[in-house]
Amino acid sequence: MAQLTVRKLDDDAKQRLETRAARNGRSLEAEARAILEEAAAVETGPILRNDEKGFGDLMYERFKDSGLTEEEFHRFNAGIAEINSRSDMRIPDFEAEDFEETPSST
């Protein structure tokens, strides 16, 4: 195992580390080790604390109760149909039996 000595650390920074260590139930050394290991970790995506929620969870919680009523759903679809009828560009109906997926050019 490697060892690391940190010289000229500001007294306030040390105090904040001690406070953070106490809050997390760790020694100052263990807290510094955890911070360094997290900072040096290979990032594979956003780093969330255990109590943090990701974007998808936050969006779900925000909008989970804002669904459309049956009437609103039909009015929405009627509005989309009206827009489509006035446009040369059509939104594809992926569930239609005659829908054909065009091959990708990549």
Image: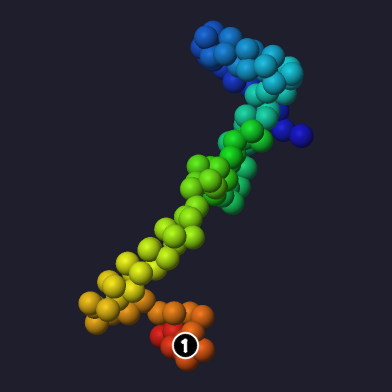
Q: Which residue is mark 1?
A: 99
| Mark 1 residue element | loop
Give how far across and how far down residue 62 sits, in percent.
Answer: 50, 42
Which residue sits at x=63%, y=12%?
19
Residue 77 quadrant: bottom left
Image quarter in which the N terminus is found: top right
Give how far across and how far down residue 38 sits, in percent.
Answer: 62, 36
The three-letter amino acid code for the residue at tag 1 is Phe
Q: How many marks?
A: 1
Residue 52 vs residue 31: left or right?
A: left
Image quarter in which the C terminus is found: bottom left
Q: Nearer the viewer, residue 85 or 41?
A: 85
Using the rendered image of the protein, determine whether residue 103 is visible from the camera's viewpoint. Answer: no
Q: Nearer the viewer, residue 33 or 84?
A: 84
Identify whether 30 is placed above or below 63. above
Circle 1 crowding by C-alpha within 10 Å: few under 14, some 14–19, many from 20: few
Please identify the residue farthest to the right as the structure is shown.
Answer: 1
Please identify the residue farthest to the front as the structure is shown.
Answer: 71
Give how far across and how far down residue 53 sits, in percent.
Answer: 58, 40
Which residue sits at x=48%, y=55%?
69
